[in-house]
Structure formats: C-alpha cells, structure tokens
Image (cartoon, helix red, strand yellow):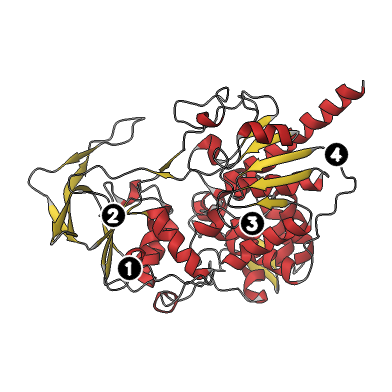
Amino acid sequence: MQQKGPTGPTGFVVQPRRLPKAEASVRVQDFGEIIVKPTPENLETQAGRCTDCGVPFCQTACPLQNNIPDWLGLSAENELREAWKIASATSTMPEICGRICPQDRLCEGSCTLNQSGWEAVTIGSVEAFIGDTAFDNGWVEPIRPLHERPESVGIVGAGPAGMAAADRLREQGYRVTVYDRHDRPGGLLIYGIPGFKLEKRVVQRRIDRLIDGGVTFVTNCDVGKDITLADLRGKHDAVLLAMGVYQARALQVPGAGPGDTLPALDFLIHQNRRDLGEADDDTGHHARGRNVVVIGGGDTAMDCVRTAIRQGAESVTCLYRRDRENMPGSAREVLNAEEEGIHFEWLGAPKALMSRDGSVSAVRAARMALSEPEFGKRREIVPVPGADFDLKADLVIEALGFEPEAFAAHHDELSLTEWNTVATARSGFATSLPGVYAAGDAVRGASLVVWAVRDGQDAAAEIDRYLKARTEEQAA
C-alpha cells in the first residue's frame, strides 16, 4: 500500500514513528516542555504517515471529533494555514490539547497504524505544531463579533471549560464575564499542569486573546463567598457553572496527621507559581534532597513524581495499589516518568506512616495481589499476608484523586447528584435553575481537559440557543 508523501511516493509502513522528545537526562534539569518542536521536514513526514482511512477511528475516538485526517493531510503537504482552519473549527485550543491530551488512550490509541502494529501517527505533536505556527504567523484571528448582543453571560471558573465557553459566546457577540477564585485565569491549565507538559506562555496567549476580544475576567473571586450565585443570576442573563474539581481525597491510614503529607495540588501549585516567576522560599513544598513517595496512580501522581525529580529529590517512588496494566494514568506519562528515573512500586497499598523525631520517615505498605478475573468486573485487590514493606520517605504526597466541592450551599434549589456534581438535563447542560447551565468537571467530576473543552463549547451553543429563543419570545 502506497501513498504520496512529502517527497514523493513512500510506503507508509516504512516510515517509523518519531516523536521529537528531549533526552531524559537533559529534560529533568528544568521545567521546559519535553516535546521538542519538530522540523518542517519531520512534521511533513510524520503527518504523511496517515493512511487516510475510510473510517477515521482517530476522529471518532476524539471527544471533540476533530477532523484529524484532513489536517494531517494538509500538514503533510505544508498547507499549515489551511490545516489550522480545520483544526480550530472544532477546538478552541488545539495547541493546548495537542500537548496534554492522553493521545495514547484517544486518537493515537485508535489510529489504524497503531492497531496494525506499525505505531500511531504523532497526532498530538502535529496538532500542537499547527497551533504554534498559527500563533507565530498571526493566523489566529482576534475575536471580533459581527454583531454585539445586549445579553450578558456570567461564567464561574476560568479553566478549560470556562475559557472554551467564553470564546464561543464572545464570538456570538455576548458580553462575557468570567469569575475565578485564583489570582490568574487559566485554572488547571495554569496551576495544575506542570510546565514540562504545558508551558504557561501557551495558556497565557489564549487568555490574552479572550481579553483582547472583550471577555472580562474577575479574579480572586470565590463564588459562594465573595459573590453568590443569586447575585450572578441578577447580573447576567445566563450563568455557566464551569468550576473545576479541587477537593482532594485524603489518605486514611494511621500516622497521617496534619502536616505529615502534602496534597498533590498544593505541591504542584507551588512549583507552577515558581514557573510563573513568583519568589517562593517555602521548603515544605519542595523536594530537593528528600526521599519522596507519591501515593496514587493517575496523571496527577505522574505530574508530582516528575516535578519532584526536577526539584532535585534524592529518590522518588510512586506507590500504587494495582499493577501497571490497571493504572488509571496515561501509559505515555508512566513511560516518561520511568525514563526520568522514577521508581514504581506496583501492587503496594499504604498501610501506615512511620515517624522518627516527630517527622515522617517511611511509608509502610501492604503487598497486594489481583483477584482472579471475572467477566465484566474489574479485578479486586487483596493483601498478601506477611508481605508488608517499608519505603523510606521524608516527603509523602497524596495523589488519590479529587472530588467536587459541595455547591448546594450556593443556592438551595440547585440540584446535585449523589456524587456532589451539578445535576443537568439528560440531553444538555441546563441545571434545575432557569438560565443556569453547568459543564466540564462540575458535571463530570474529575476528567480530561479535552472533555472540558468539548463541554464548554457545547454548553455555549446551548446558552446561545436559549438566549436567542428568549429574545424571540419577548419580541412576539
């Protein structure tokens, strides 16, 4: 099977997958992005590996339903401006998703080449390159609505869902105000994701575009404390709840007291503030010279172990109760961590924190085993008798996942689910309060950035329909 490549006909199975990634020994020296900008020749070659399938499984596996084969084909032909138009039609932040999406579980995991054993096209790298090139060349058009509308929309949360919704709503001419508890917009993109995955400048230029387009950000504003949901409903014609999920699940073992462990997000926020240029002499949130144990197996745990090794930790161990195959985090991130010298202690569950002279000195863990597989069920984990072990640790980081903060106190009539997420209509984003919508993690619980972007865009479209229908009713 042949296809036309950038230099003529090539056999697509001959060209190997090449992801331009910095060597581990180099990249652990700082917090710069580890994916190196590809050369135009490399980009064209990798994009040209796409087989242009009759059924594009990469597209169906993408939450945004990005038209991946088309912009890959255009990239292979060096038609990057056209590729950008297609990529940005379905996504408000292609250059961000291209960096942080778990492509190995989504588009690249479903790539026909990957399924055939030839390794996937480097879809994420190409997507990020297209977006960067668009910004570098001024192809990213400013938000300039054709018509200004009189209605205003208030958005709670300046993370990916809120930013995506603000982008789409402002394009339609609505006056948009985004409220966020942090001192900067960006939410998780700024404070939760380390620079080696997503440099702050990449997020900031998106924020700058929104501000230039007329979106107002109100920072240091905690909705429910500084302003109520009732206040927002009075100020705006519609409200979108797009706050993140930040309430950490706590470690429940003997010996874990206040100050004995660090929540993962606290640890990451301190480093991200350093990356933003803020002075920080808080040694309690720094791993330099320490033996670090991170408890958990998701992408946040991977962010923590990889941050700790860059801070100069003496040793870094990830303790996870299941095996590698059952780890919830991205396999790509696990591989990156292993390359960078992180030790993984699989099938180990924390049992107690040990201390010496009033400080944590070790984590005692129980060796676990997986139960026999049963059809349709996830394998259980059971402790192995007499197989406890200790891990030396003077810094223990909890990365056990996140839960929604109860939002019901903000309004008695706002319905929540049994998981404390905001309840929405089965067919959309409307909540139990008229004119109030919800999207992203506020509805899903802790999920992927790409799903937050999708939900923010779709919620904006629903709000647009609602406000236009209301205007028509009032005019009738």
**From this viewpoint, which residue is outermost toward the front?**
226
Where is residue 427 drawn, in percent x and y?
64, 26
Per the rendering, the mark at residue 150 is 4
Where is residue 113 drawn, in percent x and y?
55, 56
Residue at which label 2 appears: 261
Disc 1 marks which amino acid?
Ala
Please state if 6 lies on the left or on the right of 180 as rendered: right
Who's the residue at 92% across and 20% down the image? 476
Secondary structure beneath label 1:
loop
Who's the residue at 34% across and 31% down the image? 377
Residue at which label 1 appears: 287
Q: Is residue 34 visible?
A: no
Per the rendering, the mark at residue 369 is none
Residue at which label 3 appears: 51
Tag 3–tag 1 contact (CB < 8 Å): no
Q: Which one is nearer the viewer's eye here, 94 or 424?
A: 424
